[in-house]
Every structure is written in structure tokens, then in C-alpha cells.
Image (cartoon, rainbow, N blue to C red):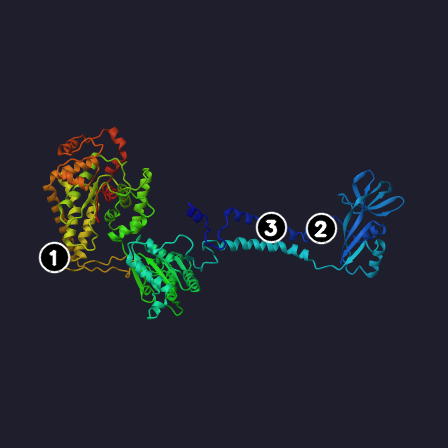
Amino acid sequence: MSDQKKKSNKKPSGDNGQGMRPGKVLIMWIAAFALIMVMLKLVSEGKPSLLNTTKRSLQLNEFWGLLNSNQIKRLKMSGPVEGEALVQVWNRKGDETSRFLLLEETDTQLTVIPLDDSGEEILQLPLAVKGEKQKEAFKAEVLFPEDYLSDDIIERIRGHLGPNMFVYTQRPFPVKQVLLSLAPWILFFVIIWFLVLRQMRSPGGSSVLSFGKSRARLANKTGKKVTFDDVAGINEAKEELREIIEFLRNPEKFQRLGGRIPRGILLVGSPGTGKTLLAKAIAGEADVPFFSISGSDFVEMFVGIGASRVRDLFRQAKEHSPCLIFLDEVDAVGRRRGAGLGGGHDEREQTLNAILVEMDGFDTDAGIILIASTNRPDVLDPALLRPGRFDRQVVVELPDVKGREAILKVHARDKKLSPDVDLAKVAKSTPFFSGADLENLLNEGALLAAMKGQNAIYPKDLDESRDKVQYGREKKSRLLHEDEKKVCAYHETGHALVSLLSPGADPLHKVTVIPRGMSLGATHYMPERDHQLWSRRRILVKLRTLLAGRAAEELFLDDITSGAQSDFERATELARMMVCKWGMSKSLGPVSYSENEDNVFLGHDITRVKSVSEETAVAIDREIKELLENGYKEAVELLSQHRDEVEAIAMGLLKYETLDAEEVEALRRGEGLNRPDDDADTVTISDQAELAEKDEDLDESDESDNSESESGIEEPAEAAAKSTVGNQDTTED
């Protein structure tokens, strides 16, 4: 749990490690809009209201009137124009709220400046309204004309107020006013920069201003490392890559003999074979910086962006030299230039050209090693594959039986297996499984055991998980009519029995009529070893076994169904390979008749050239048909000679749905099946006859309960063929 929390708390890569939430962005835009409105209002009004600290400005005559009547207590001048005066405040008699400034007083009247909201500037009032002096003084602004304050005027003012009540200083530079004037504009541009530029430099490399920046990630050396001990089943590939690590650790060992480390290594293999896992192991083992990036990260809509990212990637690599670069799925950017229908792709070709130059150009750094992976080496540009760029091609193949066992042991380290689990047997039962498939098999087995509440993973869990990974989950809820179930039983019996009667066939593992994935039933085999070559005798046995399902239907049910579709497809493909590619036809001889099968959009040529004549094509079709018909006749002959065994095995499948190899052999010998909680121990032909005598026509009410399966039966032939692809499939190696 701690590792998961650390991973979840890890901040994504980017400028500041985190992006802005949409709510914050909206608030910032609203604030920017409000600031713009305030700025427009301030500009339109001229002088900002924030500078008006007084309630009233005194005119020149008003100032002298207040000064002569001794109403000004203090005057502070900031330069020769602006000043601030503290003036005595009076109130009307009996009205504390009505206040004024006293300009002149005579025996009968008062000349005052009202401080209320009456709108009057100077009033004449009777002397009787004069009230009392107020404790507070009124702060008024005094504005003098330019060059008005001469020395005589200043002395006159000082004479009225006294030396301590008159302060005259030179006007300083208006820093406050300038700052207040510029502050809104500065704040406005800061907000625009934050909203626009920071958004363009968003995390994850999607920045408008960082289009040309590389999105390569530098491997983290502090987390959990994957090493070569975690990689199994591909020992040769590991050894080749260990040389790279050894060179980076001790380059003098190779350079003293004039050796040069390969500039590029191309990992080639089917999906799931461990190419990316090898790259992770290199990152864990190497003591040098390791950059990883995907080929799709270079492809953008605009031409030149990918090439710029390539240059930036190698620039970073040169700064960390010596280092390793892992380019995953290089075929996304390294496809053959100008190939296929419609010409090339300008952006991808520009990017490829940049990679070619950086790998082997005038300014090539020998301390940078590029490792790339692909499962489509046939579409890569020849200039990319030549020595000097990708000097080595490391083929990562599907593991053999020993490799599968080693892979299972690696992935079983953190699994709680039962002592009776035999990983060697599991490896034998999983031919052509990749490392990813095997890891998924063990994981599914652990999930199945956990769902059952078990304390360990048992062999039956792994057997079930293997079938689930390869074919899908069992569909025990699918309701099949008894007729369809009977067809499946005889069909799978034909496959199983013919394989047992054919020398050289793979050993039978089990046979089932439980629907799984796209198939209604399956016959599983467990090869004793992995076959690297196909012999003619083995292929003929394979054809006979594939066609035995249809032969059983025709012999024992007096009818045929669409369930043999996938059998015919696989048998026809094998027969065509025998005739056209492997030279196994006696009449056509050891000649390759295969045509150009490359896609015109990805291949080397725009058009396809026909390599066989019409007469040869007819001969090929005739030979393929003959091979298939001979296999079918042999299957019919074998099943006809062992009718009782077919009936017994089919009845067992109808009753128990799944039979293993030992149970099938027991039924062939006429022995009973000892299973717990079974009412009958022995399956006989009479039991099969009793089942066949049941009424096959269901009432209309019963049909409504099985409407889903019945609708599949009644669909048109073409749709039915599509829905039954893989039905009664035989699981071969």
C-alpha cells in the first residue's frame, strides 16, 4: 500500500509539477476582467480619486480670507503649487451637524464656507447663527498659481501663522503617484502572463511554446528497479544487452582492441515477448542516464515538430553522455519513406531524417546508444537498419518450454502456490504463450483462487485461468438446445478420438462442450515438446484431426452444421502452405507459388504482381482440395471403425460436459467414470440411446424461456456463420 500511495502522490512532470484547476483559471480570468474595468474607469476620470484626501479645495481668495481671519491653524506646502491647510471648523448655533469655515466676521453678519451638501460655496449668514468652535480641524487642499509664492508672499503667510505653523518643503519626486498609476498596468500584464503563458506551458509537454521540446523521460533511479533477474526465457537477448551495460561500465576493455560499441540496437519480436521489459531491465542495471520515449511522441500535425523534438532529445542525451535512449514502437516514426499508396508522410519523414542524421551524421556522439523496439521490422526504412545506425537486431522470440517455465517462476515469486502446482506441466500446456500471457495466466489464477476463498492457488485454478486467457470465460449460463449440445458432443468427440487413433498426433489433454468465448466446445492438446519444424506426416495428421469434427457430424447425426467453419479455415490454410510455400506437393514439386501479400499502403510496391498462371492456379486449387478430401476420408474411416467408442465418449460429454484424457481412455475401454456426487458410475450406449429418445420438440412456453439461444439457431446462414466463428474449435499447438 505504501508504494501505491507514493505513486499516487507523485506529481506529474511539467513546469511546476501540477496544472491549474479549471476553477482557478476561471477566477483568474474574472479578476483580470474586473481589473481592466477599474483601469478604464480610472483613465476616463482623469486624476484618480484615491489622491483626493481632502473634502474641498480652497480657492486663492478663500485662502486669504481664512488666513486674515486667523482661521488657518497650520499650513504645509509641498513645493510652490500644492499645500495642505488645517482650518478651524464652526457650527451653527443649536445645530451641531451644520458646520462651516469662517471667512469674515462683521458686527451684523458672517461670511462662511459651508461644509454640508447644500451645494453653496460661500454664504452670508446673520451673526446670531454663529455657534462654537469644533475640536477637530478641517483638512483642505490649497492650490496656488505657478510662480505665485514669492519670498514676500511666503513671509506674509509666515507672519500670520508663525514660524512653527508654516512648513515649506520642495516638492519631491511623485513616487507614490507614479507607482499607483503604473500598478494596475503591471498587475494586468502579470495576470495575462500567468494565464496565457503558463497555460501554454502546461504540464505533460503539451505546451504551445514547447512543441519542439523532447518528451523523453529520464529513468528514476530511486524507485523499484527491474533487473535482468526479472527477465527470463530470452537468455540470448539478455546476453547481447549485457554487453552494452558492460561497455558503458568499462569501455577500456573493448577500446583497447579497437572495438566500438553499436550505436543502435533494434529489439524485434511479437507483442508481449518482453521488449519493453528488457528496456526496463537495462534502465535498472545501467549506471548511466536512461531516457525513454515512444515513437508516437514525435508525430504531430505540424511538419518539423517531430524533427525538432529529435534534435532536442539528442541534445539532452549529449549533455548526459554517456547515456542510453529507449525508443519504443519505432515503426510509428521509422517507416519506409515514400512507400505504399499515396506517397510519404512529410512530418514522419522529416522526423526520420532527423533520427538518421543524429544516429550517424557529422556530429555524432559515440557515448549515446539508441535502443528501439518494434514488432514490424518489415516496414522500417532500410537506411535506419544499416550498420552504423542500428548495428544489431536482437530477436526476442516466444519462449520455448524451458523459457516458459523460467518466466512462470519469475512471476510466481509473489504468488502463493499450492505445493502440488507443477510449473513445468503448466509450461508444457501453454505452447506459443508469450511472457505477458504467462503473467496474465498466473494473475487470473490468483484472482480465481481469491474469489473462491482459497488460501493458495491450485492446479485447477491455473488450468481454468489458462483456458480463460486463451479462449475467454466459461459461458455456463448460455442455454443450448439438446440438439445443439448433441452436435457439439459428437463434433468434439470426432476431434478427440481421431487424434488418439493417429500416430504422431499431439497428446490429448481434455475435451469440453462448455461454451467459452466464441466457441461452443473445444478439444485441448498438450504437446510433449515445442515443434520448430512442420513435417509432412505431422501436417497430414493435423488435417485429419481438424476435419474429424465434420466427419463425426455426418456419420452419427446424418446432418452437417456450420460449426466446422474455423476447422475448414485452418485446414485450408495448412494445405495451401504445404502446396504454395513448403513444396510438399508431389504433382507441383518444390516450387514456391506464394504471391506478394504486402499491404499496398505499407509495402514496397504500389501494385501486386501475379506470380502464377491461370493453369497453375487451377492446379494449386486441385491439389489443396485433394489434400483436404484425403484427410476427410481418413477421418471418416477411423470413426466408422470405432463407432462404439464415439458413442460412449459423446454420451460422457453430454453428461459431464468436460472429460480429461484419462476419462476419455476409460470410456474407450468401456469402463465407468468415478466422479464424486455422480448418480451413475458408468456411461453406456444404452444411456446414450435413452437420451436420444427424449422429445426434441419443446412446448411454446419452454421456447419463450430459451428465446436467446433459439434466436441464434434461426438466424440466416451468413449471420449464423459469423456468430459461430471458432465453434467446436480444436486447441492445437
SS at mark 1 in the image: loop
**Mark 1 and mark 2: Cα distance apart in space:** 112 Å
Q: Amino acid at mark 3?
A: Leu
Pointers 1 and 3 in contact (C-beta within 8 Å): no
SS at mark 2 in the image: loop
Kindly identify which residue carries mark 2.
52
- Residue 458 falls in which quadrant of the image? top left
Question: In the rendered structure, which disc, 1 or 2, sits on the residue that comes first in sequence?
Answer: 2
- Image location (x, y in percent) of residue 188: 59, 54
Of residues 321 and 315, the one drawn nearer to the viewer in this rendering? 321
Q: Residues within 10 Å of mark 2 (few under 14, many from 20)?
A: few
Residue furthest left as drawn: 641
- Residue 277 falls in which quadrant of the image? bottom left
SS at mark 3 in the image: helix
Q: Amino acid at mark 2?
A: Asn
Q: Residue at x 62, y 53 (%)?
A: 184
Pointers 1 and 2 in contact (C-beta within 8 Å): no
In the displayed structure, 183 sits above or below 356; it is above
- Residue 691 falls in which quadrant of the image? top left
Query: Which of the numbered marks, if any, corresponds to residue 587?
Result: 1
Q: Residues within 10 Å of mark 1 (few under 14, many from 20)?
A: few
**Mark 2 and mark 3: Cα distance apart in space:** 21 Å
- Image location (x, y in percent) of residue 686: 13, 32
In the displayed structure, 37 sits above or below 210; it is above
Query: Which of the numbered marks, if any, corresponds to residue 205?
Result: none
- Image location (x, y in percent) of residue 373: 33, 58
Question: In the rendered structure, which disc, 2 or 3, sits on the residue that comes first in sequence?
Answer: 3
Question: In the rendered structure, which disc, 1 or 3, sits on the residue that comes first in sequence?
Answer: 3
Q: Residues within 10 Å of mark 3 (few under 14, many from 20)?
A: some
In the displayed structure, 697 sits above or below 567; it is above
Query: Which of the numbered marks, if any, corresponds to residue 35?
Result: 3
Q: Amino acid at mark 1?
A: Ser
